[in-house]
Image (cartoon, helix red, strand yellow):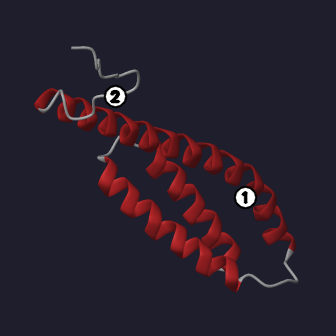
Amino acid sequence: MGPVSQFYERTAELISVLESADERDGKISRVEALLDERENLMNEMVPPFSPDEVEVGKKLVLLNSKLMQLLQKEKVLVQKDIKNLQAKKESNSKYINPYENLSTDGVFYDKRN
């Protein structure tokens, strides 16, 4: 089995991992491992390609676009969770000490006696 067909298999496996509803930490570690494998396989691919490899390459273009969409979706979900976590942390901090970050704009001292 050549590197092109192995690359195709890793791409299909990546898509199935990203579409699964597994826990996020396990999913992310598996995605990182598969991306590393794909990178190594990509370095092994050298032309000239056989007609079969060209056909697999055409299918790879379609799979790769789907993979990019799924990776972007996962990235957005992680960013959203990080943002929610930071907002929750800030809200908790304000609840514990509500007078910590008071603004002093517009404060003046009355010198009249």
Query: For residue 79, which quarter of the picture?
Result: top left
Question: Relative to 83, is 52 on the left or the right?
Answer: right
Graded by Cα atoms within 10 Å as few (under 14), some (14 to 19) or many (20 or more), the crowding at tag 2 reads: few
**Secondary structure found at label 2:** loop
Name the front one of labels 1 and 2.
Answer: 2
For this orientation, the residue located farthest to the front is 113
For this orientation, the residue located farthest to the left is 96
Question: Relative to 72, is 53 on the left or the right?
Answer: right
State the mark number for residue 109.
Answer: none
- Identify the residue shown where x is 53% and y is 75%: 37
Q: Position of residue 69 (x, y in %)?
A: 63, 43
Q: Position of residue 26 (x, y in %)?
A: 31, 56
Indicate the quadrant containing the N terminus: top left, top right, bottom left or bottom right: bottom right
**Distance between mark 1 and mark 2 Cα atoms:** 56 Å
**Residue that label 2 marks:** 103
Q: Position of residue 49 (x, y in %)?
A: 85, 78
Q: Amino acid at mark 2?
A: Ser
- Identify the residue shown where x is 28% and y is 20%: 111
Query: For residue 102, which quarter of the picture?
Result: top left
State the mark number for residue 60.
Answer: 1
**Secondary structure found at label 1:** helix
Question: Relative to 46, is 68 on the left or the right?
Answer: left
Q: Nearer the viewer, residue 45 or 88?
A: 88
Mark 1 vs 2, N-terminal side:
1
Q: Position of residue 86 (x, y in %)?
A: 32, 39
Q: Nearer the viewer, residue 53 or 30?
A: 30
Indicate the quadrant containing the C terminus: top left, top right, bottom left or bottom right: top left
**Image height of 25 relative to 72, above or below:** below
Q: Amino acid at mark 1?
A: Leu
- Identify the residue shown where x is 17% and y is 27%: 98
Q: Nearer the viewer, residue 55 or 31?
A: 31
